[in-house]
Image (cartoon, rainbow, N blue to C red):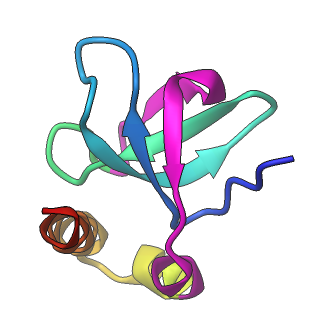
Amino acid sequence: MIEYKLGYFAKALCGHDRGKVYMIVGQDKDRVALCDGISRPLGRPKYKNIKHIQLIRSEKTANIFTSLMESGEADKLIRKEIRAREKRED
């Protein structure tokens, strides 16, 4: 069973946002709430079925997730972490 921790990254596999990287900011039964800090800020996360994403584990961001969410600039910090993640993939 795959564990979808808050703070992990996810890549969209289906839909118009295919290939886009998000951060997991919430989870319910079979869907996750995704945020990228730009078009999908924390106040308006995108919900996707877990079958339609590829999980990218990141223990570093999972460990700092609560402090990241409590900061006043959470969207800005999420964008920064996603950009850093994308640079590592290239």
- At 67% across and 62% down in the image, what residue appears? 5
Farthest residue toward the top? 15
- At 63% across and 30% down in the image, what residue appears? 50
Residue 4 sits above or below residue 63 on the image: above
Residue 82 sits above or below residue 38 on the image: below
Horizontal side, residue 15 vs residue 88: left or right: right
* Magenta highlight on residue 43: yes
| The image quarter in which residue 12 lies | top left
Q: Nearer the viewer, residue 36 or 55?
A: 55
Residue 13 at x, y = what percent?
40, 25
Residue 27 at x, y = what percent?
68, 44
Residue 55 at x, y = what percent?
54, 49
Residue 30 at x, y = what percent?
75, 27
Horizontal side, residue 12 vs residue 41: left or right: right
What segment carries the magenta color?
A: 42-63
Residue 43 sits above or below residue 63 on the image: above
- At 52% across and 63% down in the image, what residue appears? 8
Q: Quadrant of the C terminus?
A: bottom left
